[in-house]
Image: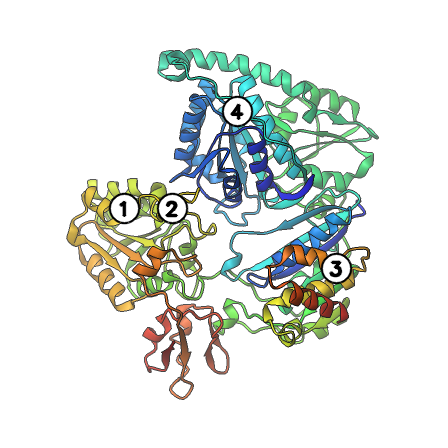
Amino acid sequence: MSEAKNILLVGVGGQGTILASKILSDALVKAGYDVKMSEVHGMSQRGGNVSTQIRYGEKVYSPIIGIGEADVIVAFEKMEALRWIEYLKPDGKIVINDYEIPSAPILMGKAEYPKGITETLKEKADILVLKAAEVAQSLGNPRVMNIVLLGSLVKAMDISGIDWDEVIRDNVKKGFEDINIKAFNEGMKQ
Amino acid sequence: MRVLLSGNEAIARGAYEAGLKFASAYPGTPSTEILENLVQYKDALYCEWAPNEKVALEAAIGASVAGVRSMAAMKHVGVNVAADPLFTFAYTGVTGGLVLVSADDPGMHSSQNEQDNRNYAEAARLLMLNPSDSQEAKDFMKLGLELSEKFDTPVMLHVTTRICHSKGLVEFEERKEVPAIPYEKNIAKFVATPANAQVMRAKLEERLAAMEEYSNTVSINQPEYRDTKVGVITSGVGYEYAKETFGDDASFLKLGMAFPLPRKLIKEFASKVDKLYVVEEMDPYIERHVAQLGIACEGKSLIPKYGELNTDIVRTAVFGTENPHATVEGMEAVVRPPVLCAGCPHRGFFYALSKRKNLVITGDIGCYTLGSAPPLSAIDTCFCMGGSISTGHGAAKALKLSGQDKKAVAVIGDSTFFHTGINSLIDVIYNKGNSVSVILDNRITGMTGHQENPGSGFTLMGEPTVEVDIEKLCLAIGMKKENIYVVNPLDLEETGKALDDAIAKDEPTVIITKWPCILKKFSAQDKEDFDLSPKKCRIDQEKCKKCKACVRTGCPAIHSGEAIEIDGSSCTGCTVCLQVCPFEAIEEVR
């Protein structure tokens, strides 16, 4: 089996998982790793769940991972953590954004949003729960929630030697560099 | 320079580097981004969205005949549409190199079926290349154009969702301009009359033999010999999964060119290994050929023959060892199905349609297929792109013939109508049907992410162009003026009245609903034609009786909990909920 590290970003269409994935994969390429990144396109704008997988190492073959293979999962939405937990390695870490986006059956009152997700997952894995939306809000821009989560993910990945400020500057909209760097650093502190 | 590129970006880059001059495509997941990326090189080449895949391939064939390198790109089911010219073009061969990109979708992430188009290469006798990552996607695109000219054949570049949408590192090279081959009239080569085609068919056998010889020697088909206890024949993304499953100890025969298959090489490889596996996604395409050579192997007896593969699935299938992982009992994530967006103009129409009874509603491929989902549940069938109007016509005739008191209503989108719906509407009118054909014109190709189309006023290369006038087109093919209804789908009364009128008539009718996709970047024309100023709706909690009529519109901005509330951040003020509220509890706020 390959020694590649596996990162899984999961969330709901529109939460900014793609930008976070792009920043992370760009950084890993700059750091000299072989990198593969895979995402499911198609229907994500229409409220579906989205996932991006990033694999890095000396040599990466498969662009995707299976059950029990993720070193770190970051769930941009709480119920998505529950959906993807079986992809986590037994000694893996999961970062969970304490943020709920009810899906269509819940909105229509046909199903209930599961209660006690973080409490249940705590017993199963090494988890970090944060309220990234509140952190982003306190920085003055709720849209940088994804970069707060990226910061927490990078901390969980325990990876060094990357100039994150530079990679973030290269990837975010002009004029929004500083707030995104702040968001990243706040995420690292969580 | 090494850049992280998706397979689709890499295919576009490869086409550019190889001196390609002409490309045509119809958008379809997972192929859409190929031309969306190719257009960045518009100073060096020409590219376009065609109304459908057959037109795209035919245009690319014309460009090849006229002497330049060309390509057509489409999703797997698009090749069904383009199959007619494809099979004959394999007889005539090319002038400039031609590559057909077939993007298959194992696991049906965004498709109605998961056919394995490698079978097409064999059936039509096309040379086929099968990249396993982004670098190969670029390299094989270039090689494909060269081999097309070398062997005088169209080439299929066969990719799958994970090749198209996964990113890997790709080395860039410069573009090499390839001079056009001056056109020379050659009737015997390009006019496929029976007399000529009979000659071509015989020649095709010679070409196949030459291509197979090449397949046996080409570097992209060479074995990697290590420990020979286990040998694996594989191709495409299957190679990546096999490599991680069997590790660096096994021997591999990776087929970068999987038609014609290198039979000599396969025999030689099989003879050198003790146990042979074939790892491939979808059909047992390679395995079938290995078996025909009388070689024993393990393939689909272990590995799933449908759905998408990954390393974990292959390893579990071959070795029976499952990865340890966490399981959560007694708690399940609620499904998150895609829904019509808040503010989608289709919602108003489908709500109005769902209130009409005794209908057979034939649907089509696009965002509006989501009209089949609860609570609207207002689509009864969906088979293929462009098929709803003809299916509705057949259903209408059958209902009438068999005395069933029901009416057929066909629902199609604007891009889909241009795709192949027009022919169907001609059928309804010509053959005196009585189905209601509804064209949901949202001013763009929605589902694949907003590509221009013949009704949107712009080309792929960003130039303003003529718009097809759907209403006039309907008139021109014989639809009576009084049987054409043009409505705002977000006006439930207007839409409902048009439906009632059309359903009551015993002749062909058309309803054109016109409102732009809410996610679209509005053009100046859109802003002039429609009131698109920002609006919101709000529920007055004192007036709300919690009857949930608004919830039953299926709008994702409406949350039904202890109170019924509208999420102001996602509401666009389309007012469908306001119109269905029996207690006037919903108000519009600007």
Q: Chain ID for label 3?
A: A
Residue carrying label 1: B393
Helix, strand or loop at disc 3? strand
Type of colouring? rainbow
On screen, residue A72 versus residue B261, left or right, reads right
Residue carrying label 4: B126
Q: Residue at x 33, y 81 (%)?
A: B584
On screen, residue A61 versus residue B432, left or right, reads right
Q: Residue at x 62, y 27 (%)?
A: B257
Distance between the alpha carbons at the discs numbered 3 and 4: 44 Å
Label whose residue precedes the other's in the sequence (2 or 1): 1
Tag 2: amino acid: Phe
Residue carrying label 3: A72
Q: Of tags 2 and 1, which is closer to the observer?
A: 2
Q: Chain ID for label 1?
A: B
Q: Of tags 1 and 3, which is closer to the observer?
A: 3
Helix, strand or loop at disc 1? helix
Q: Of tags 3 and 4, which is closer to the observer?
A: 3
Q: Are marks 1 and 3 in contact (CB under 8 Å)?
A: no
Q: Which mark is residue B458?
A: 2
The location of residue B54, given as percent across then percent down, is: 40, 34
Distance between the alpha carbons at the discs numbered 1 and 3: 53 Å
Distance between the alpha carbons at the discs numbered 3 and 2: 44 Å
Residue A82 visible in rendering? no
Tag 4: amino acid: Leu
| Front position in the image: A105 or B21 | B21
The location of residue B24, given as percent across then percent down, is: 45, 35
Q: Of tags 2 and 4, which is closer to the observer?
A: 2
Q: Residue at x 59, y 52 (%)?
A: A40
| Front position in the image: B535 or B247 | B535
